[in-house]
Image (cartoon, coloured by chain):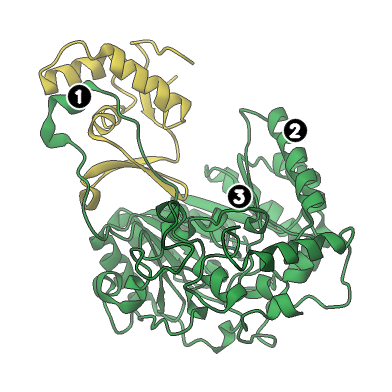
Chain colours: A green, B yellow
Amino acid sequence: MSSTQPPAAGVGPPLQTSPAVGPPTSADASLREKTSPGVGPPLWLLLELTYRCPLHCVFCYNPTEFARTGAELGTNDWLRVLREARALGAVQLGLSGGEPLVRDDLETIVAEAHTLGFYSNLITSGIGMTEARIGALKRAGLDHIQLSFQDSTREMNDFLSSTRTFELKSKVAALIRAHDYPMVLNVVLHRLNIDHVGEILEMAETMGAQYVELANTQYYGWAWLNRAQLLPSRAQLERAESLTQRFRERVAGKMQIYFVVPDYFETRPKPCMSGLGSVFLAVAPDGTAMPCHAARMLPGLELPNVRSADVRSIWYDSSAFNRFRGDAWMKEPCRSCPEKHKDFGGCRCQAYLLTGDMDNADPVCDLSPHHHLVTEAVARAAAGGAAGPLREQPLVFRDHRTSIPVVPGAAGRR
Amino acid sequence: MSEVAVSARPVIAKGLRLQWEAAQEAHVLLYPEGMVKLNSSAGAILSRCDGVRTVADIIADLERSYGMTGLAQDVQAFVVLALEKRWLELVA
């Protein structure tokens, strides 16, 4: 996950159950794992502390109408959300945005999270990180930092984020290492930088990165607007994957590299958020509670707000969080599909953006009658030739001035 | 890695955190952006990996706590697995 894109493959937190190891369990039946029926707790809480950001990334998943959303929650509201969510069993905490470092109460929020027993992950572009702040965050109990990076060449980095940030990020990477955090780098890949994946990996190695997530762009928000420019060709993708594999073999044991394939090139959808309302709860800067980062776009979903409702009633009782629980909402071909409990019909936002109906199967699935919308986009990307700079349609940089609502199907028609 | 010495002192790896979660009625192992929900035996073993106790101490403690014998092989196998998964590291 990065501040600019949803979690890897949109699946939310990796949640596993450890393998059984025998005797101690069988010796004591009272210690057996219990499976609770019905709705489980919101194990993963994401606080999007602000939509403010010094960058202007063309692939940002933040809502394109972000400038029209209401005032940010105050410190006490965030602390209350933390307490209420923790009481329900939330334990993994993402602190994101926008750029969370623009809030000067970040340290206060981290300290409360630590006291409550959250495992806290700061997801940052690194802009605003200083020796003093990282020291304060460490003392407050911050568990983890993920640094996002746009590209390895400063020119491309500055172009894609509309600001000169490369050197600063290198400095932040050094600060992260110096404060004894694992150095985790997230790079969002797309048509304009995917051919640089070799240089990106070399840079990551130079910076002492232990984990690198090469996350292909997912098409929501600003990335949706810019899809025609950002979707790579299959040839680009395959080259990048094989290059990554060779690099992975060379640095085995030193660096771990994750390559997240863009779902447009798949034939089955991602199990988005492990099903909406299953484990993931996001709170937007204005207090809107959402079952996924992008849910604000879904029509008719009455999203509750933490200013007027407590987290328990939001999670268990609100119509928005119950809307996609179970499978009664599904249409064919999902409803009768044997894989419906594996992928939950895929991504609701993608179904809405591409087909205009959020209850449809995610058209990434080749069983969807709308799958051609995805394959056509991929075919157009292949026909576009080698990756180049701007062509006939300009990239739209994330900015207050360009902030507008997204229209379903718009990226496909442009 | 296929074996671990009984004199080794395993500890939860740096950056990871083991804690009891009442809502899940389980120990969980928390790591960057993820977690593993542990079954009770895994939780019982990992909660004893404090970097002070040796593998032999842990085996003896578990056998005492659960009134059992012959746990050595299972415990060692799990410690090996947890080292491979980088949930545990050994104190030098």
Q: Which amino acid does label 1 sit on?
A: Pro
Q: Which residue is drawn at 43% across and 68% down?
A: A47
Q: What element carries label 3?
A: helix
Residue matched to label 2:
A246
Q: In this view, does A37 lie to the left or right of A151?
A: left
Residue A251 position by quadrant: top right
Using the numbered discs, state the Cα–Cα distance from disc 1 to disc 3 in whole angstroms.
43 Å
Tell me the number on the disc at residue A175: 3
Q: What element carries label 1?
A: helix
- Give left or right: position of B52 versus A333: left
- Count residues near mark 1 (Cα–Cα under 10 Å), then give few for <14, some for 14-19, many for 20+: many
Residue located 21% across and 54% down the image: A37
Circles 2 and 1 in contact, beta carbons < 8 Å: no
Task: Kindly identify which residue carries mark 1.
Answer: A24
Disc 3 marks which amino acid? Leu
Which three-letter amino acid code belongs to the residue tagged 2? Arg
Measured in 3D between alpha carbons, the distance from the residue under mark 3 to the one under mark 2, in whole angstroms, is 29 Å
Callout 1 and callout 3 share a chain: yes
Q: Mark 2 lies on which chain?
A: A
